[in-house]
Amino acid sequence: MNPNPAAIVVSGLRKSYGDKLVLDGIDLHVQSGTIFALLGPNGAGKTTTVQILSTLVRADGGLISVGGHDPARDPDAVRAAIGVTGQFSAVDNLLTAEENLVLMADLHHLGKRAGRQRAATLLERFDLTDSATKQASTFSGGMRRRLDLAMGLVGDPRVVFLDEPTTGLDPRSRRDMWRMIRELVAGGVTIFLTTQYLEEADQLADRIAVLDHGKLVAEGTAEELKRLVPGGHISLRFADATALDTAVRSLGDVPRDDDALVLRVPSDGGVASLRGLLARLDADAVEVAELTVHTPDLDDVFLAITGKPDHERELAK
């Protein structure tokens, strides 16, 4: 038996609005208890994907399973298994934090006592206990997003969709939200995340997929995606010019900086290439004073693989 089954499986997902094709046969596989990030430019289809998986919009085609249920055939079962925090807060500004959570508990039919207990638990979990009786209209952006996420967890979902969860937050509030997301995953929750902040995906996601023009153009871990674009290299610094010259004879024609005693060796950043480089230096008894691996970041990946017409993307492969 698979101890970590898939929480979300999508095959050939398609969606159009009129003559505009929004999703063109995408496939997704999200393991339980992981963070999966879906990236893409504005209009790429990220929000539509979340809306379909969370039963808000029907797909035109494809096979879908969320928490073991088909959103089209059994939407109630999917809704019972998921929580959703959208781009725009669902918080009612006229209610207090506690009242917002109790309202959600009523919608989940938890009962008065169980609902208040659940609200108290979530207020404590999201550092909102001291603000429980304050109107949400008085909250900062970070507090509002924490309350919004807490409201999505009232039903104790096993799959949580976070659509742009940290938009508009300051860096400290964003990192607080990251901590809470990691804590959810540590407790066994699966997170499906869309974000415009590439650092966010890099920091949080176990796997990342990039959506562009309604198609998935790349998928993998952050490190795998970074190796898709050129520019990676290994920087070698040596103690003296003699060691530098010996390394050049060993490695051949690579960029060198004689003043800094540094060689820059092109590399995909992988373990195999690093191991091969060190073996060549070791065979020639070359001592390296300092070694640094440089890989492109997700910004480089994003710019390299999105925004191109389909025929240009095919030529780039």
Image (cartoon, rainbow, N blue to C red):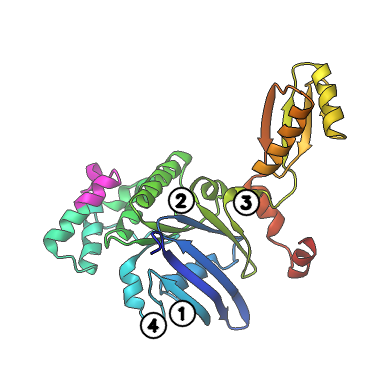
Q: Which residue is mark 3?
A: 224
For marks 2 and 4 on the same chain, the one whose residue lies earlier in the sequence:
4
Find out whether the residues at labels 3 and 1 contact each other: C-beta distance under 8 Å: no
User: Disc 2 versus disc 1: distance between alpha carbons?
Assistant: 27 Å
User: Disc 3 versus disc 4: distance between alpha carbons?
Assistant: 36 Å
Q: Which residue is mark 4?
A: 73
User: Disc 2 versus disc 4: distance between alpha carbons?
Assistant: 32 Å
Quarter containing the C terminus:
bottom right
For discs 3 and 1, the disc positioned in front in the rendered view: 3
For discs 3 and 4, the disc positioned in front in the rendered view: 3
Q: Quadrant of residue 150?
A: bottom left
Q: Which residue is mark 1?
A: 58
Query: Magenta: predominant secondary structure element?
Result: helix
Relative side of 209 to 188, left or right: right
For marks 3 and 1 on the same chain, the one whose residue lies earlier in the sequence:
1
For discs 4 and 1, the disc positioned in front in the rendered view: 4
Relative side of 71 to 114, left or right: right
* 277 versus 216 height, above or below: above
Residue at screen point 43% across, 46% down: 178
Q: Which residue is mark 2?
A: 166
* 124 versus 16 height, above or below: above
Start-end of magenta stretch: 120-133
